Amino acid sequence: MKKDQIVDEILGRKAVAVLRIKEPAKLKKVIEFLNEGGISVAEVTLTVPNAIKLIEQMTNELDKNIIVGVGSVLNPSIAEDAIKAGARYVVSPIFKKEIIEMAHKYDIPAMPGCFTPTEIQTAYEAGADIIKVFPADVLGIDFFKGILAPMPHLRLMPTGGVTLTNAGDWLRAGACAVGVGSALLDKEAIEKENYNKLTENARIIMESINKVIKK
């Protein structure tokens, strides 16, 4: 898929699973069981051991419906490594124009992390496809309403502060999608390989989202 097609898929699916796990051998199972629950966009963060190799493995082995990207990207060179390994979008906790440019060089969406109105608009002007508002729990849901009132052209995605039951509230406030990490990935369940719990969590989040979409 081309950049715009990938963006459209993310906007349509509404939820991005932010994957930070300590045991990389369990990553495939985690992604597969989240997909069973309806979350099929997987952001493999660079904090996961051997993340680049895992992205390549996931790209080759997972169902092609699952969109695997890279997260926690801090410089353009690591973005390029991840893209060459198969990452289909690039997410960063920061705004760095060079990362956006590298992603676009390969026709891949860039989702920089921003915090202030000025930073958000600057990232938009630099070509950001979706802007990750981070950490969103500090700013709150009302922040989205406040930002989008004078700047409705923005595509904002909260990461941090999205729970199993409030994803729909973020969408009502104007978010184009949500990034979900710790609320989704039950650590105890993963440790005990109770992957069905992850499927259950994904279904709860998607139920919250679908209530908004179907209205």
Image (cartoon, rainbow, N blue to C red):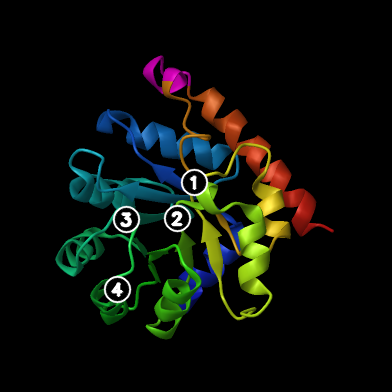
* Front residue (pair 150, 214): 150
Residue 193: within the magenta?
A: yes
Residue 152 has which mark? none
Residue situated in front as seen by the camera: 127 or 52: 127
Q: Residues within 10 Å of mark 1 (few under 14, many from 20)?
A: many
Asked if the residue under mark 2 is in contact with the one under mark 1, i.e. CB atoms within 8 Å, the reply is yes
The answer to which of marks 3 and 2 sits earlier in the sequence is: 3
Quadrant (top left, top right, bottom left, bottom right) of the C terminus: bottom right
Q: Quadrant of the N terminus?
A: bottom left
Q: Which residue is mark 1?
A: 160
Element marked by disc 2: loop
Residue labelled with disc 3? 70
Image point (64%, 72%), residue name: 148
Disc 2 target residue: 134
What kind of element bears circle 1?
loop
What residue did someone put label 4 on?
103
On the question of residue 175 being in view, the answer is no
